[in-house]
Image: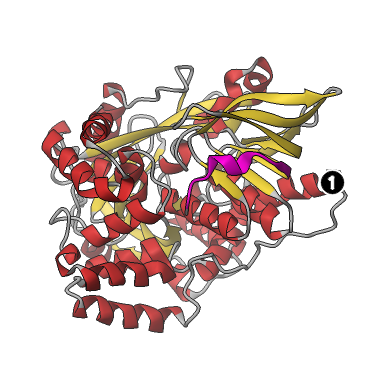
Amino acid sequence: MKRDFAALDGEFDLLVCGGGIYGAWTAYDATLRGLKVALVEQGDWASATSSSSSKLIHGGLRYLETFDFRLVRKALKERKMLLHAAPHRVWPLRFGVPVYADSRNGTWKLKAGLTLYDTLAGFPEDRMRHRHFDHARFHEHFPFLEDATLKGGFTYGDAQTDDARLVLELVAGALAQGAVCVNYARLVAWNEAQGQVCGATVQDEVSGAAARVRARQCVSTAGQWTTATAQGKAWCRLSKGIHLVMPALQTNEAILLTAKEDGRVFFIIPWYGRTLLGTTDTDYHGDIERVAVEDADVDYLLAAANGYLKTAWTKQDVIGSYAGVRVLKQSDAEHPSAASRDWELKTDSSGLHFVVGGKLTSAREDATVVVDAVCAQLGVAAGCATRDKDFPWRPQQDFAAWSEQNTVRAQQLGIDAECAKWLMRRHGARIDRVFDIVNETPQLAVRIVSELPFIYADLLLCARDEMVVHLPDLLRRRMPLLILAKMKTADLLHFAELLAPALGWDTDRIIREAEACRT
């Protein structure tokens, strides 16, 4: 993946502004249909909401309570497709749901809901179906939960991903098919001719140069930045969600719980050897450029979790945190958690298309609607090309056999099994490039942080080949060390110095990049 701002100097069939999950899927789909596509992002790929999710590919069990069956069915259909098309990128994750004596939803109500969930999923394979456990067996699964009033519980199947790398792989796929994709390319203005949008002026945030990008059709997938205009504010409702990164628990399964304070759903999720705790769901009216984790958010999540844990978590246990803003369709719902997670395609009088709302899980299908609309305007008769298509980095062999083979290869190179598992999930078929680096420099097989499944060779590959511009790109999104480990200034300088040759940084740049991570 090479960044080439100069390549924007040309005429395109489609310009997509916004490099999150919706922009990535739209650009990838349009390129596969034969359109000449440009994708620009003002920051790094997935640098806003699309790297601040719960890292789930799921139907949304809680949406059954609001009778949003169509959305759940749609998301479950996408989950099934993604598990098959991208087994390296999307993997099964079981969730536990405990039933206590005072639970808002008792055994029979949960049984009915989970049966419906399986039905909407088309009666999935056994690994994804729900199961019921009595008190003793449920406690074996989740021994860290309070069990004095535990009656039993259920587990059910959903799926997990690394959201930032999901976006990155789709951008890489669009690039490989001929799209021009440039991060740190800020939209200055939409350009019009005779009242119709005909492209945009874009500024290179690296060099300061500007380009007038000409395009026959334009789509804004700008997420929260859609609300920068009065029109966008009328379309959108913003909701902030935060997650805390906590120590690992004794499980490889996730848990769905209900906050005792207000009845809202939250998750406890294993991820990269840590635990994600989240999320909150509160209306957001603040600065869209500076979305922060507040003390009240932390207090809320810790109190919600400690209502169920035998050993309480404190603020000292918090390893990292992150905040994001969901864009929801405007609604009269009293609370954002009751607002629909579905999306809309808006087109203004200039012909500019806007994506409003949506979900990580269902973004692919929504993007097909966007590209259908673009193709209709262009007079192009080309249907969706992404359904059931293998992901760009999907191994072409049988996935189970490929995984076993690469686990053995990794161990022969001195890479432990847990790191090998995550290397396969992070890079898919590109894992050979990591192995080549280790072959050349065996000491790069060691873990960067002893408790986390990352090795130095992985970090070096990301720096060399994944369009990294700044150190936070590398340490937050390509490899999320900044939220999974507590980094000191000396650590950040160490990483910047180590990777400086690959990124062409001098001493002054090394210091600036380390400071950018610290702040």
Residue shown at 76%/39% (left/top)? 217
Q: Considering only vertical position in the picture, is 62 above or below 326? A: below
How many numbered badges does the structure rendering display? Answer: 1
Q: Is the C terminus in the top left, top right, bottom left or bottom right quadrant?
A: top left
Residue type highlighted by circle 1? Leu
In terms of depth relative to the viewer, which is nearer, 256 or 186?
186
Residue shown at 72%/44% (left/top)? 12
Q: Quadrant of residue 412?
A: bottom left
Q: Considering only vertical position in the picture, is 229 above or below 59? A: above
In terms of depth relative to the viewer, which is nearer, 222 or 248?
222
In terms of depth relative to the viewer, which is nearer, 289 or 200?
200
Magenta span of residues: 2-12
In terms of depth relative to the viewer, which is nearer, 382 or 268?
382
Q: Residues within 10 Å of mark 1 (few under 14, many from 20)?
A: some
Residue 394, how many percent across, how many down?
A: 49, 70
Mark 1 lies on residue: 378
Q: Is residue 433 magenta?
A: no
SS for dot 1: helix
Any part of residue 498 in sight: yes
Q: Is residue 165 left or right of residue 350?
A: left
Q: Is residue 415 left or right of residue 19?
A: left
Residue shown at 26%/52% (left/top)? 150
Residue 302, how many percent across, how many down?
A: 24, 34
Residue 417, how many percent across, how many down?
A: 22, 72
Residue shown at 44%/39% (left/top)? 44
Q: Is residue 114 left or right of residue 495?
A: right
**What colouring style does the render use?**
secondary structure
Residue 295, how many percent across, how many down?
A: 26, 23
Q: Is residue 9 magenta?
A: yes
Any part of residue 102 in sight: no
